[in-house]
Image (tube, rainbow, N blue to C red):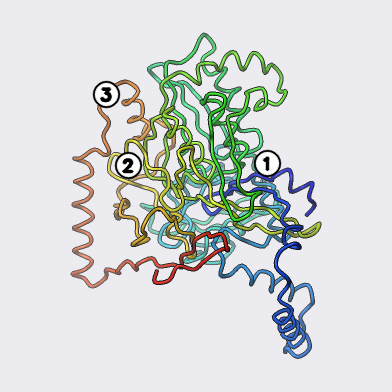
Amino acid sequence: MSTRRFRGIGLLTAGALGGVLISLGLTALAQRGEPLPLRELQQFANVFSAIKNTYVEPQSDEELINNAIKGLFTDLDPHSAYLDEDAFKEMEAMTQGGFGGLGIEIGSEDGMPKVISPIEDTPAARAGILAGDIITHIDGKPTKDMSLNDAIKLMRGEPNTPVDLRISRSGRDKPIEFNVVRDLIKVRSVRSKMLDGDIAYARIAQFQEGTAADLLEQLSKVKPDGQPRALVLDLRNDPGGLLESAIGVSSAFLEPGQLVVSTKGRIPSSNREYYVRQLQTVLNGRKGENNTIQRVEWLKKVPMVVLVNVGSASASEIVAGALQDHKRATIIGNRTFGKGSVQSVVPLSESAGLKLTTALYYTPNGTSIQVTGVEPNIVVDDTAAGNLFRLPREGDLKRHLLNSTIEETSTEDTEQAEIPDEIKMFELGGADDYQLKQAVNFLDGKPVQRTDPVLAAQLREQAQAAQAKAEADGTATPKPAVKGEHFRVTPQGLETVPGK
């Protein structure tokens, strides 16, 4: 993996399990640091030699070294990782918005992948896969307790290659079999439209290289005969992407000179502040940029709501936190994922590198969202009947970094009660989008409700009755407590927090 290639993806927030990546000169720094532990390295060499010469099956030098390197990361936080050639290619494809796959957004339910939404005009959508489907098998492999990353890897692949899926669908007694042919998926990161009441709506699905410029161009044309009176920016289920893109998006709504985000870490080069960019810089020479800039002047002035939920992570949280701290927008929805640590990409060779946690990032007010996430100004559930998405947050991940400003007593999320099966999946930005309706109510000066009390009570009663029946029948299974290891960043490095 070359330094040049890393520079192209240097500032990255990689999904619900990702973070801000900053390409730093850490190799030379490491060489100037403490002397190498020669005795321990000799011990490693002895173990390496013993395995290579006496293990029952032959092991190549490359395989042993790669496995040893990966082992160094097993006790670090969940966002630090060794990047082999395949891992780098996947990261590069994600940030550029194209990859071979099926075209679905997935979450997790009962330890199996659940389709949050098929992406329009992709193999999954054309095959008839629907939101809410549970993927029980991928190419014959059961997905129970399979990590989302492993499931994604199995479904991605070269275009024009097939993958077999077995799906469990609500209301169907038998599983459904699909044979889907992968295609090149180009994720459309920005979608926009006008809502009733002269309100503009823009959804960012992922922060890619051209996201900020695409957002400016689309919103300059969203109302050809003038400017909207208000705006809803939808960052729900947006796992992140490029930090530079997050700064560009924030720059569309904030005033020049305002701070967007800062990072603080153990080494001086990881202590940085990022400010609002000029829109000429964001558009970067796109055709008609002067006209675009003139037509988006309203973005810094009109009333604005940002929609977030548990699936809003990293770059999404940077944007939401900046707009909230500067009082530019009202945040509505659910508490976000809570990914507040910084990863640096360190090139090792032409084909390998490290993704290493080096700092935490802070909102303009100096707040760390690590574990806590961004708290909405107004909490509104996913649906009128309650919350729908059962995604883990940062605090649910094993070995996550602690936020030194809070006391963690439990990783269980008290906000997300058990969700009745009667709550149905919906299209973000669609006619049955409850949170969007509440955002419009807010902009119209109407009352905003967290849920529909009557409907929520009905489903709660149904769920309680079903639980009581299961307990009486002896079929209820207790929900295990979520436990994990905890770490904090100190000037000396990562320290384990005991007693957690």
**Label 2 Cα neighbours within 10 Å, binned few <14 / some 14-19 / many ≥20:** many
| Residue named by callout 2 | 381
- Given residues 262 and 162, the one toward you in this image is 262
Q: Nearer the viewer, residue 105 or 237?
A: 237
The numbered dot on residue 446 is 3
Label 1 – label 2 distance at C-alpha: 32 Å
Q: Nearer the viewer, residue 248 or 59?
A: 248
Per the image, label 1 sits on a secondary structure element best described as helix
Task: Tell me if residue 384 comes above or below residue 43 in the rendering.
Answer: above
Q: Of helix, strand and loop, which one carries label 3?
A: loop
395 or 126: nearer the eye?
395
Left or right, 52 with reference to 430: right
Name the residue rendered at 77%, 84% in the picture.
58
Q: CA separation, marks 3 and 1?
A: 40 Å
Q: Amino acid at mark 3?
A: Lys
- Please name the residue shown 50% across and 47% down the image: 129
CA gap between label 2 and label 3 equals: 17 Å
Answer with mark 3 or mark 1, whichever residue precedes in sequence.
1
Q: Which residue is mark 1?
A: 96
Q: Where's the N terminus, which quadrant?
A: bottom right
Q: The disc labelled 2 sits on which kind of residue? A: Asp
Image position, residue 112 (x, y; %): 46, 60
**Amino acid bearing label 1:** Gln
Q: Counting residues from the N terminus, which is met first, the one under dot 2 or under dot 3?
A: 2
Image height check: is 418 above or below 238? below
Other residues around mark 1 within 10 Å, as few (<14) / some (14–19) / many (≥20): some
